[in-house]
Image (spheres, rainbow, N blue to C red):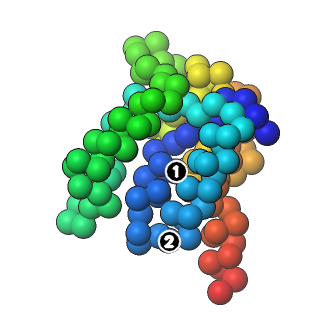
Amino acid sequence: MSGRVFVDTNVLAYVFDDAEPEKKVAARRCLDHERRSGELVVSTQVLQELFVCLTRGGAPMASPDVAEQAVMDAAKLTVVQIDVALVLEAIGQSRRSQLSFWDALIVRAAVAGGCERLLTEDLSHGQVLDGVRVESPFVSTRAGARRR
């Protein structure tokens, strides 16, 4: 499938997550495939969250320098700016769809970015929200983990 694909923070962060080797491989494989077949889209929210996610806690996934480079690399993708209008749309989306505000903001950014699909593990795989299909690159990873 081609077209615009929105990438949530968790997919980008797993590229650096040595504690989740199967998800790390799945994230890399998915992103490589999507780069070849379509246009990847993120938002300013994703850029912010990526830096925090990679550097937080007692055992961060990446050093601040590596995290900054990851954000700079992600910023080379198509970036949807989070503005007041998008925040207000996300509030409405959150109320209508019973999503957390932050998940609703990701959905609204995907819609604003003209995306057909949203890559995330935070929403239900296969769910369609305002014309954007949710896909988790980790569905088969989770299923494989349960079989063991």
Which residue sits at x=32%, y=53%?
Answer: 54
Which residue sits at x=32%, y=61%?
Answer: 61
**Where residue 75 appears, x then y in whole percent?**
41, 31
Residue 90 visible in the snapshot? no
Q: Residue furthest front?
A: 36
Q: Residue furthest right?
A: 1
Under mark 1, the amino acid is Val
The crowding category of the residue bearing disc 2, from other C-alpha atoms within 10 Å (few below 14, some 14 to 19, many at least 20), is few
Q: Which mark is residue 37?
A: none
Residue at which label 1 appears? 11
As drawn, is 73 to the left or to the right of 97? Answer: left
**Where residue 116 appears, x then y in whole percent?**
71, 31
Which residue sits at x=62%, y=78%?
Answer: 145
Q: Tell me the element at label 2.
A: helix
Q: Nearer the viewer, residue 19 or 102?
A: 19
Q: Residue furthest top?
A: 85
Q: Nearer the viewer, residue 42 or 68?
A: 68
Mark 1–mark 2 Cα distance, whole angstroms, equals 13 Å
Q: Which mark is residue 21?
A: 2
Q: Tell me the element at label 1.
A: helix
Q: Is residue 147 above or below residue 133?
A: below
Indicate the quadrant containing the C terminus: top left, top right, bottom left or bottom right: bottom right
Q: Is residue 78 above or below residue 61?
A: above
Under mark 2, the amino acid is Pro
Q: Nearer the viewer, residue 109 or 102?
A: 109
As drawn, is 140 to the left or to the right of 109? Answer: right
Which residue sits at x=62%, y=40%?
Answer: 35
As drawn, is 61 to the left or to the right of 117? Answer: left
Q: Earlier in the sequence, mark 1 or mark 2?
A: 1
**Where residue 19 appears, x then y in whole percent?**
41, 72
